[in-house]
Protein backbone atom coordinates (compact mmCIF):
# COMPACT_ATOMS: atom_id res chain seq x y z
CA UNK A 1 0.00 0.00 0.00
CA UNK A 2 1.28 3.47 -0.86
CA UNK A 3 2.22 5.86 1.94
CA UNK A 4 -0.28 8.63 2.73
CA UNK A 5 1.86 11.30 1.03
CA UNK A 6 1.69 9.49 -2.31
CA UNK A 7 0.29 11.44 -5.28
CA UNK A 8 -1.03 8.32 -7.01
CA UNK A 9 -4.67 7.26 -7.14
CA UNK A 10 -6.88 6.47 -5.32
CA UNK A 11 -7.68 9.67 -3.46
CA UNK A 12 -6.56 9.91 0.15
CA UNK A 13 -9.84 10.50 1.92
CA UNK A 14 -10.28 10.75 5.69
CA UNK A 15 -11.46 7.14 5.78
CA UNK A 16 -8.56 5.85 3.72
CA UNK A 17 -6.00 7.77 5.78
CA UNK A 18 -7.41 6.24 8.95
CA UNK A 19 -7.37 2.72 7.51
CA UNK A 20 -3.80 3.01 6.22
CA UNK A 21 -2.50 4.58 9.44
CA UNK A 22 -4.25 2.01 11.62
CA UNK A 23 -2.57 -0.82 9.70
CA UNK A 24 0.77 0.99 9.78
CA UNK A 25 0.72 1.57 13.54
CA UNK A 26 -0.55 -1.96 14.19
CA UNK A 27 2.46 -3.29 12.28
CA UNK A 28 4.64 -1.16 14.55
CA UNK A 29 3.21 -3.01 17.55
CA UNK A 30 1.05 -0.31 19.13
CA UNK A 31 -1.87 -1.44 21.29
CA UNK A 32 -4.50 1.03 20.07
CA UNK A 33 -3.62 1.86 16.46
CA UNK A 34 -7.11 2.94 15.39
CA UNK A 35 -7.55 5.26 18.36
CA UNK A 36 -4.07 6.70 17.81
CA UNK A 37 -4.83 7.32 14.14
CA UNK A 38 -8.12 9.06 14.93
CA UNK A 39 -6.65 11.27 17.67
CA UNK A 40 -3.74 12.32 15.46
CA UNK A 41 -5.92 13.06 12.43
CA UNK A 42 -8.41 15.02 14.54
CA UNK A 43 -5.49 17.07 15.87
CA UNK A 44 -4.12 17.71 12.38
CA UNK A 45 -7.61 18.67 11.21
CA UNK A 46 -8.26 20.71 14.40
CA UNK A 47 -11.62 19.10 15.03
CA UNK A 48 -13.26 16.86 17.65
CA UNK A 49 -12.52 13.20 16.97
CA UNK A 50 -16.23 12.43 16.62
CA UNK A 51 -16.39 14.66 13.50
CA UNK A 52 -14.16 12.23 11.61
CA UNK A 53 -17.03 9.73 11.50
CA UNK A 54 -19.12 12.03 9.32
CA UNK A 55 -16.20 12.95 7.04
CA UNK A 56 -14.85 9.59 5.85
CA UNK A 57 -15.40 10.50 2.18
CA UNK A 58 -13.84 13.95 2.53
CA UNK A 59 -10.40 14.65 1.06
CA UNK A 60 -8.35 16.66 3.58
CA UNK A 61 -6.36 19.68 2.48
CA UNK A 62 -2.68 19.45 1.66
CA UNK A 63 -1.78 21.24 4.90
CA UNK A 64 -3.81 18.73 6.96
CA UNK A 65 -2.14 15.80 5.18
CA UNK A 66 1.29 17.29 5.80
CA UNK A 67 0.59 17.87 9.50
CA UNK A 68 -0.89 14.39 9.87
CA UNK A 69 2.04 12.75 8.09
CA UNK A 70 4.47 14.40 10.54
CA UNK A 71 2.42 13.31 13.56
CA UNK A 72 2.29 9.73 12.29
CA UNK A 73 6.04 9.74 11.66
CA UNK A 74 6.77 10.86 15.22
CA UNK A 75 4.28 8.37 16.63
CA UNK A 76 6.00 5.58 14.71
CA UNK A 77 9.28 6.64 16.32
CA UNK A 78 7.71 6.21 19.75
CA UNK A 79 6.50 9.66 20.82
CA UNK A 80 3.34 9.23 22.93
CA UNK A 81 0.13 10.47 21.34
CA UNK A 82 -0.65 12.71 24.33
CA UNK A 83 2.61 14.61 23.86
CA UNK A 84 2.01 14.92 20.12
CA UNK A 85 -1.43 16.49 20.54
CA UNK A 86 -0.62 18.24 23.83
CA UNK A 87 -3.48 16.90 25.91
CA UNK A 88 -5.06 13.85 27.52
CA UNK A 89 -8.56 13.25 28.91
CA UNK A 90 -8.77 12.35 32.58
CA UNK A 91 -11.95 11.96 34.61
CA UNK A 92 -13.87 13.26 31.56
CA UNK A 93 -11.87 16.51 31.51
CA UNK A 94 -9.20 17.62 29.00
CA UNK A 95 -5.75 18.23 30.49
CA UNK A 96 -2.71 19.86 28.94
CA UNK A 97 0.30 17.54 29.03
CA UNK A 98 3.90 18.16 28.02
CA UNK A 99 7.08 16.07 28.33
CA UNK A 100 7.58 17.77 31.72
CA UNK A 101 4.80 15.65 33.23
CA UNK A 102 3.62 12.06 33.25
CA UNK A 103 0.74 11.22 30.94
CA UNK A 104 -2.33 10.60 33.16
CA UNK A 105 -3.41 6.95 33.37
CA UNK A 106 -6.97 5.65 33.76
CA UNK A 107 -6.09 3.77 36.97
CA UNK A 108 -5.22 7.08 38.65
CA UNK A 109 -8.88 8.06 38.35
CA UNK A 110 -9.49 5.65 41.25
CA UNK A 111 -7.66 8.15 43.48
CA UNK A 112 -10.23 10.82 42.63
CA UNK A 113 -13.11 8.41 43.16
CA UNK A 114 -11.79 7.41 46.59
CA UNK A 115 -11.13 11.02 47.62
CA UNK A 116 -14.69 11.93 46.64
CA UNK A 117 -16.05 9.02 48.66
CA UNK A 118 -14.14 10.14 51.74
CA UNK A 119 -15.33 13.72 51.30
CA UNK A 120 -18.96 12.68 50.88
CA UNK A 121 -19.26 9.77 53.31
CA UNK A 122 -16.78 10.58 56.07
CA UNK A 123 -16.41 14.35 55.92
CA UNK A 124 -20.08 14.95 55.05
CA UNK A 125 -19.05 17.28 52.21
CA UNK A 126 -17.75 19.77 54.76
CA UNK A 127 -14.89 22.19 54.19
CA UNK A 128 -11.61 20.33 54.04
CA UNK A 129 -7.96 20.71 53.17
CA UNK A 130 -6.25 18.38 50.72
CA UNK A 131 -2.67 18.02 49.50
CA UNK A 132 -1.63 16.52 46.17
CA UNK A 133 2.03 15.59 46.50
CA UNK A 134 3.87 15.32 43.20
CA UNK A 135 1.02 16.94 41.32
CA UNK A 136 2.56 16.67 37.82
CA UNK A 137 -0.08 17.80 35.33
CA UNK A 138 -2.39 18.53 38.25
CA UNK A 139 -5.06 15.96 37.42
CA UNK A 140 -5.68 14.95 41.04
CA UNK A 141 -5.61 18.50 42.39
CA UNK A 142 -7.84 19.88 39.64
CA UNK A 143 -10.39 17.06 39.68
CA UNK A 144 -10.68 17.16 43.45
CA UNK A 145 -11.09 20.94 43.46
CA UNK A 146 -13.69 20.74 40.68
CA UNK A 147 -15.80 18.01 42.26
CA UNK A 148 -15.29 18.95 45.93
CA UNK A 149 -16.30 22.61 46.00
CA UNK A 150 -15.79 22.99 49.77
CA UNK A 151 -12.21 21.72 49.58
CA UNK A 152 -9.03 23.78 49.37
CA UNK A 153 -6.15 22.05 47.62
CA UNK A 154 -2.39 22.44 47.97
CA UNK A 155 -0.54 21.04 44.94
CA UNK A 156 3.16 20.35 45.42
CA UNK A 157 5.88 19.31 42.99
CA UNK A 158 9.64 19.48 42.90
CA UNK A 159 9.53 20.43 39.19
CA UNK A 160 8.78 24.07 38.30
CA UNK A 161 7.93 22.96 34.74
CA UNK A 162 5.33 20.52 36.08
CA UNK A 163 3.80 23.20 38.30
CA UNK A 164 3.46 25.47 35.27
CA UNK A 165 1.49 22.78 33.43
CA UNK A 166 -0.66 22.10 36.48
CA UNK A 167 -1.37 25.81 36.81
CA UNK A 168 -2.55 25.98 33.20
CA UNK A 169 -4.93 23.11 33.83
CA UNK A 170 -6.30 24.71 36.98
CA UNK A 171 -7.02 27.92 35.06
CA UNK A 172 -8.63 25.98 32.19
CA UNK A 173 -10.99 24.26 34.63
CA UNK A 174 -11.67 27.46 36.60
CA UNK A 175 -10.46 26.08 39.94
CA UNK A 176 -7.22 28.06 40.25
CA UNK A 177 -8.71 30.16 43.04
CA UNK A 178 -8.92 27.06 45.29
CA UNK A 179 -5.55 25.50 44.49
CA UNK A 180 -2.28 26.72 45.97
CA UNK A 181 0.78 25.63 44.00
CA UNK A 182 4.08 25.15 45.80
CA UNK A 183 7.49 24.04 44.58
CA UNK A 184 8.57 21.50 47.18
CA UNK A 185 10.41 18.22 47.64
CA UNK A 186 7.42 16.27 48.96
CA UNK A 187 6.04 18.26 51.92
CA UNK A 188 9.30 19.90 53.00
CA UNK A 189 8.46 23.49 52.00
CA UNK A 190 5.06 23.68 53.68
CA UNK A 191 4.53 26.11 56.59
CA UNK A 192 5.19 24.34 59.88
CA UNK A 193 1.59 24.42 61.10
CA UNK A 194 -0.08 23.36 57.86
CA UNK A 195 -2.22 20.21 58.20
CA UNK A 196 -4.65 18.34 55.95
CA UNK A 197 -7.73 16.16 56.01
CA UNK A 198 -6.43 14.20 53.02
CA UNK A 199 -3.04 13.73 51.40
CA UNK A 200 -2.97 12.14 47.94
CA UNK A 201 0.09 11.13 45.97
CA UNK A 202 0.95 9.29 42.80
CA UNK A 203 4.69 9.12 43.56
CA UNK A 204 7.50 7.52 41.54
CA UNK A 205 7.14 3.77 42.17
CA UNK A 206 9.06 2.01 39.38
CA UNK A 207 12.17 0.20 40.63
CA UNK A 208 15.35 1.44 38.96
CA UNK A 209 16.07 -2.07 37.70
CA UNK A 210 12.67 -2.12 35.97
CA UNK A 211 13.14 1.17 34.12
CA UNK A 212 14.91 -0.41 31.14
CA UNK A 213 12.03 -2.87 30.75
CA UNK A 214 9.40 -0.18 30.35
CA UNK A 215 7.83 0.36 26.93
CA UNK A 216 9.89 2.70 24.76
CA UNK A 217 7.21 5.38 24.73
CA UNK A 218 7.38 5.56 28.53
CA UNK A 219 11.08 4.95 29.13
CA UNK A 220 12.37 7.32 26.45
CA UNK A 221 9.78 10.11 26.63
CA UNK A 222 8.17 10.47 30.07
CA UNK A 223 10.10 12.18 32.89
CA UNK A 224 12.25 9.74 34.87
CA UNK A 225 11.95 12.02 37.90
CA UNK A 226 8.27 11.04 38.10
CA UNK A 227 8.87 7.35 37.38
CA UNK A 228 12.05 6.09 39.08
CA UNK A 229 11.34 5.20 42.70
CA UNK A 230 14.80 3.89 43.50
CA UNK A 231 16.17 0.39 44.04
CA UNK A 232 12.88 -1.12 45.25
CA UNK A 233 10.59 1.54 43.85
CA UNK A 234 9.69 2.85 47.30
CA UNK A 235 12.45 5.32 48.18
CA UNK A 236 10.25 8.38 47.64
CA UNK A 237 7.31 6.67 49.35
CA UNK A 238 9.47 5.87 52.39
CA UNK A 239 10.28 9.56 52.77
CA UNK A 240 6.72 10.69 52.14
CA UNK A 241 4.91 8.46 54.64
CA UNK A 242 6.35 9.95 57.88
CA UNK A 243 5.99 13.46 56.48
CA UNK A 244 2.35 12.76 55.69
CA UNK A 245 1.72 11.26 59.13
CA UNK A 246 2.94 14.50 60.71
CA UNK A 247 0.76 16.65 58.43
CA UNK A 248 -2.56 14.82 58.72
CA UNK A 249 -5.23 15.92 61.14
CA UNK A 250 -6.47 13.17 63.50
CA UNK A 251 -8.47 10.74 61.38
CA UNK A 252 -7.10 12.24 58.17
CA UNK A 253 -6.51 10.00 55.17
CA UNK A 254 -3.38 9.17 53.17
CA UNK A 255 -3.92 7.71 49.68
CA UNK A 256 -0.92 6.41 47.73
CA UNK A 257 -1.01 5.07 44.19
CA UNK A 258 1.48 2.20 43.93
CA UNK A 259 2.58 -0.47 41.51
CA UNK A 260 1.34 -4.05 41.87
CA UNK A 261 4.93 -5.29 42.28
CA UNK A 262 5.62 -3.22 45.38
CA UNK A 263 2.16 -2.77 46.92
CA UNK A 264 2.86 -5.32 49.66
CA UNK A 265 6.10 -3.54 50.58
CA UNK A 266 4.32 -0.18 50.78
CA UNK A 267 1.66 -1.74 52.99
CA UNK A 268 4.40 -2.94 55.35
CA UNK A 269 5.98 0.52 55.46
CA UNK A 270 2.61 2.09 56.26
CA UNK A 271 1.84 -0.52 58.93
CA UNK A 272 5.13 0.29 60.69
CA UNK A 273 4.75 4.06 60.44
CA UNK A 274 4.17 5.97 63.66
CA UNK A 275 0.86 7.78 63.77
CA UNK A 276 -0.82 5.85 60.95
CA UNK A 277 -3.20 2.93 60.77
CA UNK A 278 -3.30 1.03 57.50
CA UNK A 279 -6.66 0.63 55.82
CA UNK A 280 -7.74 -1.79 53.09
CA UNK A 281 -5.84 -1.47 49.83
CA UNK A 282 -8.01 -0.75 46.78
CA UNK A 283 -7.58 -2.83 43.64
CA UNK A 284 -7.83 -1.42 40.13
CA UNK A 285 -10.14 -2.79 37.42
CA UNK A 286 -7.57 -5.48 36.58
CA UNK A 287 -7.69 -6.60 40.24
CA UNK A 288 -4.14 -5.36 40.87
CA UNK A 289 -3.45 -3.61 44.21
CA UNK A 290 -3.34 0.07 43.33
CA UNK A 291 -4.22 2.43 46.20
CA UNK A 292 -2.65 1.92 49.62
CA UNK A 293 -4.66 3.70 52.32
CA UNK A 294 -3.92 4.84 55.84
CA UNK A 295 -5.54 7.00 58.49
CA UNK A 296 -3.86 9.23 61.03
CA UNK A 297 -4.41 8.18 64.63
CA UNK A 298 -5.25 10.70 67.36
CA UNK A 299 -2.03 9.69 69.13
CA UNK A 300 -0.08 11.22 66.28
CA UNK A 301 -1.29 14.65 67.32
CA UNK A 302 -1.26 15.07 71.13
CA UNK A 303 -2.93 18.16 72.56
CA UNK A 304 -0.71 21.20 72.95
CA UNK A 305 1.29 21.08 76.16
CA UNK A 306 1.35 17.28 76.47
Image (cartoon, grey):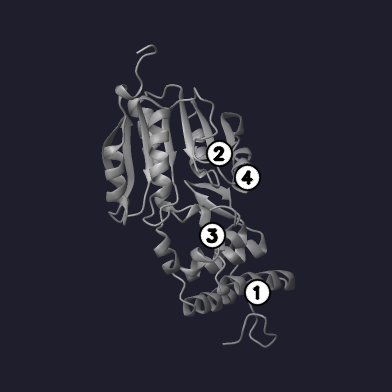
In the picture of the structure, the residue carrying the numbered disc 3 is 222
Q: Is residue 169 left or right of residue 133?
A: right
For marks 1 and 2 on the same chain, the one whose residue lies earlier in the sequence: 1
- Figure check: 267 above or below 30: above
- Residue located at (48% from left, 80% from top): 27
Measured Cα–Cα span from mark 1 to mark 2: 41 Å
Measured Cα–Cα span from mark 2 to mark 4: 9 Å
For marks 4 and 3 on the same chain, the one whose residue lies earlier in the sequence: 4
- Figure check: 295 above or below 223: above
For marks 3 and 2 on the same chain, the one whose residue lies earlier in the sequence: 2
Work out whether residue 22 or residue 264 is closer to the camera in this orientation and state it. 264
What secondary structure is found at the residue carrying circle 3?
Answer: loop
For marks 2 and 4 on the same chain, the one whose residue lies earlier in the sequence: 4
Tell me residue 110's x, y (percent).
38, 45
Look at the image and tell me whether residue 54 can be seen.
no
Tell me residue 165's x, y (percent).
62, 46
Work out whether residue 49 or residue 226 is closer to the camera in this orientation and state it. 226
Measured Cα–Cα span from mark 1 to mark 4: 33 Å
Residue 160 numbered tag: 4
What secondary structure is found at the residue carrying circle 1?
Answer: helix
Are the residues tagged 1 and 4 within 8 Å (C-beta)?
no
Q: Nearer the viewer, mark 1 or mark 2?
A: 2
What secondary structure is found at the residue carrying circle 4?
Answer: helix
In the picture of the structure, the residue carrying the numbered disc 2 is 184
Q: Nearer the viewer, mark 3 or mark 2?
A: 2
Q: Could you classify mark 2 by the number of other residues whose Cα lies within 10 Å: few (under 14), some (14-19), or many (20 or more)?
A: some
Tell me residue 29's x, y (percent).
45, 76
Work out whether residue 155 or residue 15 is closer to the camera in this orientation and state it. 155
For marks 1 and 4 on the same chain, the one whose residue lies earlier in the sequence: 1
Amino acid sequence: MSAPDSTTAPTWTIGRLLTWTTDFLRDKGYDSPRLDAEVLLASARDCPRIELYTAFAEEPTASVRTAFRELVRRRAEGTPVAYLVGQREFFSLPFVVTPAVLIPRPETELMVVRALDIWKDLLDESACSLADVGTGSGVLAVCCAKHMPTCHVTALDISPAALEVAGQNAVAQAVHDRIEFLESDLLAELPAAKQFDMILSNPPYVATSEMLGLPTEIRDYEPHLALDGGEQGVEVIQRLIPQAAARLRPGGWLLLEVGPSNAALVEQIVARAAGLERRQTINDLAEHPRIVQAQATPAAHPPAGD
